[in-house]
Amino acid sequence: MEKLAEKISEITKQAGGEWGIQLEDLTTNKVFSQQETKMFYAASVIKVPIMIAVFAAAEEKKFNLSDTITLRKEDITGGSGVLQKMTPGTALTIYDIIMLMIIQSDNTATNMLIDLVGKEYIQQQMKKIGLENSTYHHKLMIQPLEKDGSNEINALEMAEMMKKLATGKIISVWASQQMIDIMKSQQLQNNIPGKLPDPSSEILGGAKRWEAAHKTGSISKVRHDVGILYVGEQKMIFSVLSSGVDDYEAGQTLQDIGLEIYKYLLAE
């Protein structure tokens, strides 16, 4: 881990800006931390705690994940996602809305789920899973934006959240597994996994070279990626947050970090 830490420190130093990083090798329990408690604007990483809150509400029998919600014109907002292009009146299951929120970072889907469970419930669930400093206060892409605070996270708490998911300690083993599976379907792969080799096996039906269960987040000069990288039997929790870096440079830096993590796990 020391060599990996040195390489990542050098990569982020060259990139400039601010970087909050927490890595944990789940085999050796070795950790690398860099400004891990520094607070960053959450961007779309906040969608993971929102997903957790929706699964928690389903566990409490407030609704079933198979229940449907009808897309309304007033639900539609801009930014990422496909729901903004779909016809109002379209009915989707809650599970499918969660899937769109995570794998396409769909902002309309996110706001529909926020309306479903409520701001206070999301805040309660965040505290329940140990997010003492990370905060949720407002919907995404809503103008004019009325808010009493900012959505903020730090690398340490996001890594701890991902470790709890990976070990089945959020809500239930079943719920944790479902959320990991959703995050493994991530379609936005231009950050941590961006420079990794094709994961497909050369043998049909063979195991993938690697998998990543993760969630990205980005706005201008803010770019994050948090999740778990699986390489064979090796697993690494990663939480990499950045601010004040040119968007292209931040993306390239995240990809360089991802490649170093991959090479580290490959050699273990």
Image: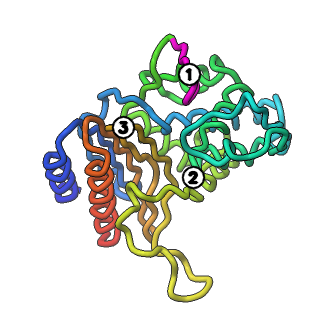
> Disc 2 or 3, which lies upstream in sequence?
2
Instruction: Assign the N terminus to one quadrant of the image.
Output: bottom left
Up/down of 207 relative to 149, above or below: below
> Disc 2 or 1, which lies upstream in sequence?
1
Q: Position of residue 259 (x, y in %)?
A: 31, 64
Q: Please give the range of residues in magenta.
A: 138-147
Look at the numbered disc 1 and give the secondary structure of its residue.
loop
- Residue denoted by label 2: 183
Q: Is residue 52 visible?
A: no
- Residue denoted by label 1: 143
Would residue 143 be counted in the magenta stretch?
A: yes
Residue type of the residue flagged with mark 3: Ser
The CA span between labels 1 and 3 is 17 Å
> Disc 1 or 3, which lies upstream in sequence?
1
Q: Position of residue 168 (x, y in %)?
A: 59, 46
Residue type of the residue flagged with mark 1: Gln
Name the chief secondary structure element in magenta. Answer: loop
